[in-house]
Image (cartoon, helix red, strand yellow):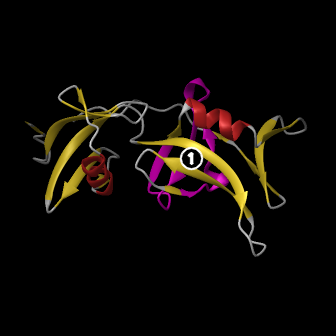
Amino acid sequence: MTMNPENEIPSLPIRIDKDGVWYYNGTVMFREDILKLFFESLKRDEEGKYLIEFEGDKCFIEVEDTPFVVKTVGKGNRENHEKEFIEILLNDFTSEKLDPSTLRVGMDNVLYCDIKDRKFEARFSRSAYYQIAEFIKYDEDKDAYFVSLNGLNHYIGKSLIRLKTQEQP
């Protein structure tokens, strides 16, 4: 564990790679119960750095891109005439309805969206990207891509170039 002299919050040797895989001292973490606990305890500080906060303790972790990754995508509508939606399954073992207004493309044409009430960003895995591509259309007049749900077109924004990858403090 290393100390961060600025605010004395230590850093743990935990790293999350761009595919959402967690590592401790270079070894893959695979226990679902521990990963769920870490995901539930994940926070961001004022500077956007990721940390785990649990029972009053805080520790920074290294995140290569985003801690959350969209693993699968499906479109549906529920019975009783509920509106259609796109559901995403995340690497934290949860699923939620996609807010299509938050879709954006980053560097290297990587697709991102906001999740968890817009508290976090998620990166689409390659397979999830291909799954959502089935629902993406192109508007020639606007030279832009969009997802259409319930008669509304949600245009996919372009992220400003990601300033830098999250580094361990």
Q: Residue furthest bottom?
A: 80
Residue 46 in the image, given as x and y percentages of width and height: 31, 52
Whether 42 is among the magenta residues is no
Residue 19 in the image, given as x and y percentages of width and height: 43, 31
Position of the N terminus by quadrant = top left
* 48 horizontally vs 8: left or right: right
Q: Disc 1 designates what residue? A: 113
| Region of the chain picked out in magenta, as a range | 96-122
Helix, strand or loop for disc 1: strand
Whether 116 is among the magenta residues is yes
Residue 150: image quadrant is bottom right
Query: Where 69 sits versus 165, above or below?
Result: below
Residue at image position (49%, 44%) is 122
Position of the C terminus by quadrant = top left
* 167 horizontally vs 71: left or right: left
Residue at image position (16%, 39%) is 12
